[in-house]
Image: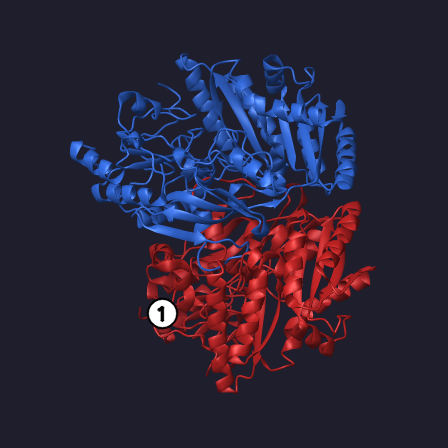
Chain colours: A red, B blue
């Protein structure tokens, strides 16, 4: 596919669609600012457009489709898989200023949101009505719901509450031909035709641009309890996860941190994590007050039975908050070890968690990489983080090989390449390994049927020739 | 599309694929037996094939695709929307004998099932491990999981637990070209490419044939409580639904029965429903024992505040079971009024439930039809049932008009044509009303890209010329 470059004449056409010049950026420093996200690689767009209305998006897409110009939707660029990177230049559609709707309808148990709204702001808005929007990616304070929708973001509540997709009832979408389409609606049950809502959520901006969403809310649980269990072997912690999950209790969060994470966090900001432990589990149960009180004690007993070195139930809200803050600090904390963080999200069936930990240890030793592991153990979604220094190209090469082996292990154990970060550009070369030729083909034909000119976020999900992990310069 | 008729030579080719002649049916009485489902209309297939293996399905589909023969997957034919009807003749693929896998993996919180397995048998298998498969359509004792997957079946637990789609992690699918593809996997989180699993579930057999599924299970709640509240006006019952749902409690079931349902059930089998009520709500909360005990009392108080005429909390398991059995008896009971039951499933946003009840009353009066209403009030999924006599063609014409008006009202109130029964042949003509031209087009291009010869359950979902409700002979 050859794309047309944006010349002076085409730029003038863009100004006709968006007459407000402050929302059309073309300066060199703008192009550089929009050339990266939280993953690897750097690609400059030709122009950045900041739409405020669905209709503006529609006009821009129609224009891009007419002239075969690639178009890259973007929120706050927290993507860990290269989702918004403009790998073919063209237009970056910055949706972060599209924040005009954040409305909660408590009688319908829904919220209607614009794509630029921060996920954390949806949490706050819902809580004002005693409601909850469960998906809570670690970046929720700074990421947009539009990005969450494009990537189908997860977070620690996946086990009990599911992921972003499970809370999307309807969408307003601008299709690759620029049509404005509404999918789904405002009801929990809807079987009218194919589920385009759930096809588009998680399609990483390759099938259309989401300009509005109807989200499902649930009553906010009245109570929660948090427990910290320390283990002398990481395998025992893994076994504890299985033991808890088969006990009849469904924790709202079940996180694991290995020694590397614990030490990094404590060095970054002392949070009361035990420095002598090989791993800790951080567990939350939520629901009715009398239920959570009993359940957290049951969880504690299960941890003890399986051999936890120590167990501590948080006794105040401050203690709870401190523990969960520690969990959110892992990401900044581990970059103190080394500056370049490669954050993976290989996901395995629950019973394979202990085996996956064993394999990760082997990978660390084999490739001599700094590998620390945290993750949403309760839903099998581990985060093996490799920290390295991008200036050390030999180390980056070893990291690349280690990551490839992590992918292979996850798929071998019946899991998946990506649990919540998305495929983007980085994992595209590994798609066929998991999906097979035919599975990938079924996806490709949808893409080609909807977007014959391949203008919507091209270069993502589907592998193209000579594409690699981009860790090395 | 012109389809090729199955002549002697083609039949011989089918026998080569399925040498077991007892699994290839061609007798007239077989063709008649497979010509109908639980909806309207009757269409004879040319041959019925009963595969036992995914590979057999693959061969049959490849054969059908090569010769352009329509192929109609079918389970136990409980469809209320004409899903399995062979409207263009061809091959009915009877999957009801494909029952070899029903395996629960408690450590992974999953079950792996073959399409012919009865949904009720999955419930029983999961319960043996203290687990639960939440979707529970009223027909669960007699319907197959394959049909549930094709139609994305719902049932009373939709509000708290979601529908079939929310419990499908992965599929084995035979595509319209006969390829065997695996989608998704065994993990709760999976964002590797487009979500083909959730696209295929609910696609009513038009995108492929599901030959195996990986289902998500949850810990079975340890306790449940049931309450029956009677109301003198149906609008008050509707208001009570809103009041309960905004109180912070999420009932596991919240069903409504109007006077017509109550009287029919009591005449059919006395179940303790109050004959003097205009409507009753039947409410279940589930979870931890101490939580459910408190919550059911809170629910009772909310009902009292809003003006319930009487409230009764079930005091024993027998009482609970009797009440829920009464709910399941509605369907057979109302056909005592008149023999022909037209069961709709128009669904509206929660806040529109009282308005929808008002409109249903108006429709009943306007078209002079016997309209009784039950439904899953908690998720906005009402079941307006029109009972009539198919021999009275004038009455059937009025029923047809009433149903069209029900569809229009649901869409007008921000709802949907179908919450859980599917589109099939009966609602296909109304698709554009809800989806718009562009929305329907996006679905059509997927169908055409995957199934260019239109052999997979043709005549369903997408409207074709001169298609009507088929109520009249």
Rendering coords of residue A369 (x, y %): 55, 79
Query: How many numbered marks, from 0 up?
Result: 1
Q: Is residue B175 left or right of residue A434?
A: left
Which of the two residues, A35 or B226, is positioned nearer the viewer here? Answer: B226
Rendering coords of residue A61 (x, y %): 41, 61
Q: Is residue B366 left or right of residue B252?
A: left
Q: Residues within 10 Å of mark 1 (few under 14, many from 20)?
A: few
Going 44% across and 23% down the picture, which residue do you hit?
B401
Which of the two residues, B183 or A450, is positioned nearer the viewer here? Answer: B183
| Residue A125, quarter of the rendered image | bottom right
Observer able to see residue B311: yes
The N terminus of chain A is located in which quarter? bottom left
- B353 over A166 or under it: above or below: above
Identify the residue under disc 1. A464
| Residue A101, quarter of the rendered image | bottom right
Which of the two residues, A53 or B400, is positioned nearer the viewer here? Answer: B400
Rendering coords of residue A180 (x, y %): 44, 52
Q: Residue under mark 1: which chain is it in?
A: A
């Amino acid at each position: 596919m050859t794309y047309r470059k944006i010349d002076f004449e085409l730029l003038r056409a863009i100004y006709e669609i968006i007459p407000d010049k402050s929302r059309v950026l073309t300066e060199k420093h703008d192009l550089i600012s929009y050339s990266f996200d939280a993953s690897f690689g750097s690609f400059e767009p030709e122009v950045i457009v900041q739409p405020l209305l669905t209709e503006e998006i529609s006009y821009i897409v129609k224009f891009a489709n007419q002239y075969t110009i690639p178009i890259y939707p973007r929120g706050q660029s927290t993507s860990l898989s290269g989702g918004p990177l403009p790998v073919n230049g063209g237009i970056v559609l910055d949706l972060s200023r599209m924040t005009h709707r954040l409305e909660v309808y408590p009688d319908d148990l829904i919220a209607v949101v614009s794509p630029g709204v921060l996920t954390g702001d949806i949490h706050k808005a819902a809580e004002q009505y005693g409601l909850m929007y469960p998906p809570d990616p670690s970046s929720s304070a700074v990421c947009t719901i539009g990005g969450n929708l494009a990537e189908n973001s997860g977070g620690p509540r996946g086990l009990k509450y599911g992921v972003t997709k499970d809370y999307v009832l309807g969408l307003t979408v601008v299709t690759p031909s620029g049509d404005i389409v509404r999918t789904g609606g405002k009801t929990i049950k809807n079987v009218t035709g194919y589920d385009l809502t759930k096809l588009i959520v998680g399609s990483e901006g390759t099938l259309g641009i989401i300009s509005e969403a109807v989200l499902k809310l649930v009553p906010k649980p009245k109570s929660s309890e948090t427990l910290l269990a320390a283990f002398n072997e990481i395998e025992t912690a893994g076994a504890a996860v299985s033991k808890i999950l088969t006990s009849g209790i469904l924790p709202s969060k079940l996180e694991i941190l290995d020694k590397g994470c614990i030490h990094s966090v404590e060095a970054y900001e002392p949070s009361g994590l035990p420095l002598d432990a090989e791993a800790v589990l951080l567990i939350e149960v939520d629901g009715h007050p009398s239920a959570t009180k009993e359940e957290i004690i049951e969880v504690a007993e299960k941890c003890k039975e399986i051999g936890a070195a120590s167990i501590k139930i948080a006794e105040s809200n401050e203690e709870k908050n401190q523990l969960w803050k520690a969990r959110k600090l892992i990401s900044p904390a581990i970059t103190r070890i080394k500056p370049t963080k490669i954050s993976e999200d290989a996901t395995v069936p629950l019973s394979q968690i202990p085996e996956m930990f064993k394999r990760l240890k082997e990978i660390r030793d084999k490739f001599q990489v700094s590998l620390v592991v945290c993750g949403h153990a309760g839903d099998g979604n581990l985060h093996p983080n490799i920290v390295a220094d991008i200036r050390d190209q030999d180390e980056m090469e070893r990291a690349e090989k280690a990551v490839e082996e992590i992918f292979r292990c996850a798929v071998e154990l019946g899991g998946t390449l990506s649990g919540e970060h998305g495929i983007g550009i980085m994992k595209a070369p590994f798609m066929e390994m998991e999906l097979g030729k035919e599975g990938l083909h079924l996806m490709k034909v949808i893409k080609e049927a909807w977007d014959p000119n391949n203008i919507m976020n091209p270069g993502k999900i589907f592998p193209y020739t000579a594409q690699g992990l981009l860790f090395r310069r």
